[in-house]
Amino acid sequence: MNGAADRTEAESTGAQTAWKPPSRLLVLIVCYRAVDLTIDCLASLEPEIEPGIGVVVCENGTGEGAAETLRAEIARRGWGAWASVREISPNRGFSGGNNAVLEDVLTWHEPPEHVLLLNADTIVRPGALRVLLESAGAHPEAGVISPRLEWPDGTPQVSCFRDFRPLCELEKAAGIGPVSRVLRRWVTALPVRDEPTTPDWTSFACALIRFSVLREVGVLDSGFFLYFDDPDYCLRARKAGWVVRNEPAARVVHLRGRSNPAKELARQKKRRPWYHYASRARYYAKHRGRLGLLAANVCWTVGHMLALLRRALGGKPPPACEREARDIWTNFWNPMAPPDRGQDG
């Protein structure tokens, strides 16, 4: 991406200093219909920029002059020496948007030591990049390192998890205390800790990846349009012998739901978008085979039936989203279908 980055920065009006590929850390932000959020994220990064650190924003098919707006704002604020814009179209989702840049970075003659995947709907707290880089230096076994994600008021968000397994689906669909206690080893969400931990996977709303991991494991799987890309990549890294590490001393605000409504839809139990279920099918089939996907769907159905029984006996309603009993079968017959076929069901 040497040439692409230089071209995009040269096109930005008023830039005083050309963007140069960073040697230590490349921060990669994918922007889709989130121009204002992206600018706020860049503003939070400005005090953290040091020699060897640079940022690329991948404008992921928003259109309507989004890339031009970003370039103009970068030039106006004097960020051109460290921030650049790469424009692609159409929208390729989270994995595809990141890969548009990562695949170029893999061809650089002198690539950065680390890449930081960063959501547009984040605000980087002071010192977060420094803490993540120091953790990488102190723990060479860690291939993926994440910060603590939190709300603007400092309340922590759950961002570390166990791998998805079929019994996780039973526990999640049931939403019943006794069931969760029996299946506590299969609850995916891990408690927030004040000390570093090594979860199975961590949220890629903000995640530092060593370049050596990218070289060994490859880029993200573009078959995941959105969701399940982070557990997939962390599992691939762990299979290659790397450790996933969470460093809570690094803090990043995640304005969850601002750049993508799917989590808010789930909270309200409204129907999730098709790509959530298409990615779920791909994950289970990829790592556990077709029988693993079938087992996951059967376990979810059993849990859902238990939740329906609880409601019939006067208890709380099931935790399932609207039409989820049908939607979990999305792409069952072709789970490795490319993202643009995810609506086929």
Image (cartoon, rainbow, N blue to C red):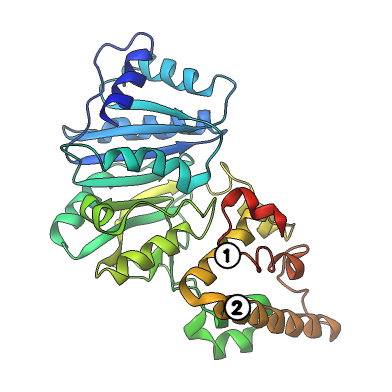
Mark 2 to mark 1 CA distance (whole Å)? 10 Å
Task: Name above or below for residue 56 compared with residue 243.
Answer: above
For the N terminus, the quadrant is: top left
Please, what is the three-letter code of the amino acid marked with disc 2? Ala
Residue in view at x 25 percent, y 58 percent = 216
Image quadrant in which you'd find residue 314:
bottom right
Residue in view at x 30 percent, y 30 percent = 46
The one of 299 and 247 positioned closer to us in this rendering: 299
The one of 3 and 262 positioned closer to us in this rendering: 3
The reply to whether the C-beta atoms of the residues labelled 2 and 1 are less than 8 Å apart is: yes
Residue in view at x 54 percent, y 31 percent = 61
The one of 214 and 56 positioned closer to us in this rendering: 214
Image x and y of residue 49, in percent: 24, 33
For the C terminus, the quadrant is: bottom right
Task: Name above or below for residue 177 compared with residue 121.
Answer: below
Position of 15 with respect to 31 (left or right) is left
N-terminal-most mark, 2 or 1 = 1
Position of 333 with respect to 59 (left or right) is right
Give the residue number, with chain letter if any, for mark 2: 296
Task: Name above or below for residue 312 compared with residue 197.
Answer: below
- Disc 1 element: helix
Image x and y of residue 337, in percent: 58, 58
Image quadrant in which you'd find residue 244:
bottom left
Give the residue number, with chain letter if any, for mark 1: 280
